[in-house]
Image: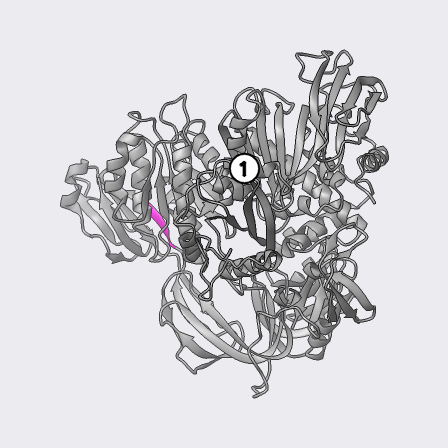
């Protein structure tokens, strides 16, 4: 495989639960550019049950579009690229297909090690079935029966600070050891131990002979510190191993990557973390991936990544999970038309059974994107619980400053108009201050994250190229006022043309100014007292250079936090108006 | 491009060879042999139900220090005991003993404690439908085969049963209503179009119905249906959706026959789905159903989304260009000749093959 110096072509595969994508990047004028993508239905599930088929079809589509041969006669990937222009120099792959691992968490204290384990679990593809802890009221034998009946793929064992609790941790280890001896052959789970590091040898001694054991550094080395990264890496390997055992094609894909097959969420998180080190250090970078089986929220603040994978929130098979997090009213509040609750609930269950299906009618489209908003909001709510203090929802009700926000996922990518994707993101995320919304319609982010190690420049270069769609710059003042009261005055001096636009924006308005993709302007903002744009406090004015996008420059003066009208009719009327205002409708 | 698209497949087949695996949760004993004919209610394998465990504090029970427990042990790891048999003791002046709390097995003895696996009873695995045994591993799985009609559903409540099938109502869209569920239907498997109220589901319990096959079920009734003692299978979807015509015709033409309902939950990993099996006399014309059917001209399909949700038709043309829909969505599409509707264009992602 080539190094960064001579690597030219990058081929990336992402195997999702519904779609498999192959994306090709090449160097043009010394910069990485997105060339083409090929999409096919994923084939991880029955009856094909081999991801290789979906990969082959996706690669064939890239070959069809580019004319570049990527697979040789023996169905092997051509790496490195050959002189005749076939093959690729660098190949990376990511995968999220396959069920989340059934997991039982075993730890000590609910507020300490188990809390860290929860954050670890929510950052990847684990389905936590139950937790066993020191304060558990169930008898020991009931805990053993629980472990046996749950038939877990994984036991995540945590507890104790390094050099701290010994006996209590070993008591939990012994519990797992007893259960381990009782699992039927072929159903023995893997154990990942991420507790008191001084006990690793003792844990290995007690468990190592009975089940596959992975030892990782403590997720809670001291009471006040948490270190999830090493355990996350090892968990990714375990998830990959389990999936390889269950679904054909994973092993071959892993071999193609030289053993570096990444989880899609990890790669998505990595690109956000990388960008947070490149962009404004005062602001975070956020990525939202609304998938069919998971919703991933990645937030990175100056290199500190907080990754949340919601395995029960997705716009496909995972959709019924939304009803455990949200009421139907929280879904229907986003609708511009009146749709009965029972229809919404039927829709949820039907869509879950046919995750690939798409809304052909206008009413269904509105419903699909109302669900999308609430899925993202629910995922964001979970994610923010794990954000650093001062940025989490407990300390700040409002979103912290972010730049940029990257959104991906099938539903957002196929939004009929960029305005609809934009409004979904504005409603669901409610960004504050000034930020850029970027849509990843080809789901390239995981590829860039996976490629960040061999090709560090690729993420920044491709982000600015044609593969991503800048929806526009959003100006969203924090504050509230009565309807139609002035919120801010603005002046936009467009670069190149000399055009100037000046006006006043009133509360409740969603204003879109024409500023196309690739266009820039100088924006001067003068908020009224009580409205904060991040220029140093409420009422403070400021000016900055802004970029345009597929929608334009968006001034969202609907208030932060956004409060929708209580009256259903009025609320729907406003939802409809905002759809028109932002250009989301035909 | 279109020929490579593999949509989901639902089987609605008047005649097919049907092979199904029956599997114990834990290894046990298979009670049948290859080529043996079995009835629906025949037990094909037996095993132990998932056991419960209990820790017995021997030191405390005997009233002796932990290090002395070994002296009084009357059983060892692996021993099978009947309820009341002595595990340890007698010890001390009071001749204290610790006895087995139920039939079971000694799992381990350590630190003065004994882990005892209590026998939880026998789990009987029934055939579920009349069939011939065509394979077994001798301890856990049995492969059964029959010839018959097969109707796969999209949702099931996890139960299964076997009985005579009766159609309630006159058409594929008729609602299941309490006033139609009389004593004549006692013990029958019921076929109806739509259920949007819990009362008929409960009334069916009252007349000891052996199962219900529906076109559409209101999703708010999922929790109710999940608790019913009999199997419930939904074929078209959630909401006021009738049975599609091929399904209704197949079910109604077999009314009066004994049918098997296996309302297992859909599992995308292994493709297992809720289904109705109608055993029919063997014939050489039957084939194994196909599970991989590329979408192309001539293939029979069912719509999985509005408009025309649940309607059945035949693909007439795979369109080369993506089509713009009223929703604004641009989607790969097919021209389909829908029964009762005529030619219409639909997104291929909204189609399932009906074989």
Residue A27 x/y as whole percent:
54, 43
Residue that lies at the very extreme toward the bottom in this rendered image: B284
Residue in the image at 55% along x and 57% along y? A68
Q: From the viewer's side, name the closer residue of B237 and B318.
A: B318
Q: The C terminus of chain B lies in which quarter of the figure?
A: bottom right
Residue A180 x/y as whole percent:
32, 48
Q: The N terminus of chain B lies in which quarter of the figure?
A: bottom right
Q: From the viewer's side, name the closer residue of A342 and A298.
A: A298
Q: Give the extent of the magenta segment.
A: B51-55
- Bin the neighbour count of mark 1 within 10 Å (Cα to Cα): few under 14, some 14-19, many 20 and up: many
Looking at the image, residue B91 sits to the left or right of residue A45; the answer is left
User: Can I make out residue B203 in this image?
Assistant: no
Q: From the viewer's side, name the closer residue of A404 and B302.
A: A404
Q: Looking at the picture, does residue A251 appear above or below residue A28?
A: below
Chain bearing mark 1: A
Q: From the viewer's side, name the closer residue of A476 and B211.
A: A476
User: Can I make out residue A107 in this image?
Assistant: yes
- The quadrant in which residue B66 appears is top left
Residue in the image at 59% along x and 59% along y? A61
Residue B310 x/y as whole percent:
74, 64
Looking at the image, residue A238 sits to the left or right of residue A492; the answer is left
Residue in the image at 64% along x and 68% along y? B3
Q: Looking at the picture, does residue A209 appear above or below residue B26?
A: above
Is B52 in the magenta?
Answer: yes
Is A253 in the magenta?
Answer: no
Q: Main secondary structure of the magenta part?
A: strand
Residue in the image at 85% along x and 33% along y? A570
Q: Which residue is mark 1?
A: A459
Looking at the image, residue A278 sits to the left or right of residue A527; the answer is left
Quick one: SS at disc 1?
helix
Residue B340 x/y as whole percent:
83, 70
* Badge count: 1
């Amino acid at each position: 495989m080539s190094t960064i110096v001579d690597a030219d072509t990058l081929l990336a595969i992402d195997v999702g639960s519904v779609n498999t994508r192959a994306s090709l990047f090449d160097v043009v004028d010394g910069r990485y550019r997105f060339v083409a993508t090929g999409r096919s239905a994923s084939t991880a599930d029955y009856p094909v049950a081999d991801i290789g088929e979906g990969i082959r079809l996706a690669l064939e589509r890239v070959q069809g579009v580019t004319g570049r041969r990527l697979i040789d006669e023996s169905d092997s990937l051509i790496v490195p690229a050959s002189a005749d222009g076939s093959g690729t120099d660098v190949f990376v792959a990511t995968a999220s297909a396959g069920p989340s691992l059934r997991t039982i968490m075993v730890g000590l204290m609910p507020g300490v090690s188990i809390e860290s384990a929860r954050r670890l679990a929510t950052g990847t593809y684990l389905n936590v079935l139950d937790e066993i802890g020191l304060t558990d009221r169930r008898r020991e034998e009931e805990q053993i029966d629980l472990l046996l009946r749950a038939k877990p793929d994984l036991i995540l064992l945590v507890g104790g600070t390094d050099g701290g609790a010994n006996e209590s941790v070993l008591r939990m280890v012994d519990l797992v050891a007893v259960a381990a001896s009782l699992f039927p052959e072929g159903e023995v789970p893997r154990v990942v131990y991420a507790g008191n590091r001084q006990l690793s040898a003792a844990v290995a001694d007690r468990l190592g002979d009975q089940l596959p054991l992975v030892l990782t550094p403590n997720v809670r080395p001291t009471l006040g510190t948490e270190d999830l990264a090493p355990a996350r890496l090892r968990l990714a390997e375990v998830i990959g191993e389990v999936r390889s055992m269950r679904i054909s094609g994973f092993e071959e894909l892993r071999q193609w990557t030289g053993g570096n097959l990444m989880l899609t969420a990890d790669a998505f998180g990595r690109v956000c973390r990388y960008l947070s080190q490149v962009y404004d250090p005062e602001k975070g970078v956020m990525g939202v991936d609304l998938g069919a089986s998971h919703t991933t929220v990645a937030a990175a603040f100056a290199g500190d990544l907080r990754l949340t994978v919601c395995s029960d929130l997705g716009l496909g098979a995972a959709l019924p999970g939304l009803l455990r997090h949200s009421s139907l009213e929280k879904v229907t509040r986003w609708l511009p038309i009146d749709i009965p609750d029972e229809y919404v609930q039927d829709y949820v269950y039907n869509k879950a059974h046919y995750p690939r299906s798409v809304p052909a009618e206008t009413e269904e489209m509105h419903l699909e994107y109302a669900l999308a908003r609430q899925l993202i909001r629910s995922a964001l709510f979970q994610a923010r619980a794990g954000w650093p203090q001062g940025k989490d929802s407990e300390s700040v009700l409002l979103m912290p400053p972010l730049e940029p926000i990257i959104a991906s996922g099938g539903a957002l990518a196929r939004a009929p108009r960029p305005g609809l994707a934009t409004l979904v993101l504005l409603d669901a995320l409610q960004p504050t201050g000034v930020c850029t919304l970027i849509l990843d319609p080809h789901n390239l982010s995981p590829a860039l994250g996976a490629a960040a190690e061999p090709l560090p420049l690729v993420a920044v270069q491709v982000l600015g190229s044609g593969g991503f769609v800048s929806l526009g710059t959003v100006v969203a003042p924090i504050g509230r006022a009565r309807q139609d009261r002035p919120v801010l005055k603005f002046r936009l001096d467009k670069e190149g043309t000399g055009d100037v636009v000046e006006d006043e924006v009133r509360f409740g308005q969603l204003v879109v100014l024409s500023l196309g993709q690739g266009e820039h302007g100088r924006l001067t903002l003068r908020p009224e007292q009580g409205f904060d744009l991040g220029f140093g406090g409420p009422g403070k004015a400021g000016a900055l250079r802004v970029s345009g996008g597929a929608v334009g420059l968006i001034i969202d003066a609907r208030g932060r936090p956004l409060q929708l009208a209580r009256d259903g009719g009025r609320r729907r009327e406003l939802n409809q108006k905002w759809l028109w205002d932002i250009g989301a409708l035909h | 491009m279109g020929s490579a698209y593999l949509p989901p497949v639902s089987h609605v087949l008047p005649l097919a060879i049907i092979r199904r695996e029956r599997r114990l949760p834990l290894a046990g004993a298979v009670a049948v042999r290859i080529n043996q004919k079995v009835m629906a209610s025949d037990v094909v394998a037996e095993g132990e139900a998932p056991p419960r465990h209990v820790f017995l504090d021997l030191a405390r029970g005997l009233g002796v220090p932990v290090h002395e427990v070994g002296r009084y042990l009357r059983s060892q790891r692996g021993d099978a005991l009947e309820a009341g048999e002595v595990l340890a003791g007698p010890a001390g002046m009071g001749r204290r003993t610790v006895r087995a709390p139920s039939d079971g097995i000694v799992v381990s003895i350590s630190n003065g404690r004994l882990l005892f696996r209590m026998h939880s009873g026998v789990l009987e695995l029934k055939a579920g439908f009349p069939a011939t045994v065509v394979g077994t591993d001798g301890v856990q799985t049995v492969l059964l085969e029959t010839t018959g009609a097969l109707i796969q559903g999209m949702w099931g409540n996890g139960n299964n049963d076997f009985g005579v099938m009766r159609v309630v109502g006159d058409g594929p869209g008729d609602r299941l209503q309490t006033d139609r569920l009389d004593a004549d239907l006692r013990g029958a498997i019921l076929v109806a179009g739509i259920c949007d109220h819990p009362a008929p589901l409960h009334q069916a319990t009252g007349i000891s119905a052996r199962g219900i096959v529906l076109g559409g079920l209101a999703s708010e009734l999922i929790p109710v249906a999940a608790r019913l003692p009999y199997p419930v299978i939904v074929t078209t979807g959630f909401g006021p959706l009738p049975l599609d015509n091929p399904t209704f015709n197949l079910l109604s033409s077999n009314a009066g026959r004994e049918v098997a309902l296996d309302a297992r939950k859909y599992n995308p990993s292994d493709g297992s789905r809720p289904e109705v099996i109608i055993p029919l006399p063997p014939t050489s014309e039957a084939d194994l159903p196909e599970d991989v059917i590329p979408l192309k001209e001539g293939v029979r399909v069912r719509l999985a989304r509005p408009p025309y949700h649940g309607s059945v038709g035949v693909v007439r043309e795979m369109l080369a260009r993506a089509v713009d829909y009223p929703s604004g969505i641009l989607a790969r599409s097919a021209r389909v000749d829908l029964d009762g509707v005529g030619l219409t264009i639909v997104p291929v992602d909204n189609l399932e093959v009906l074989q």
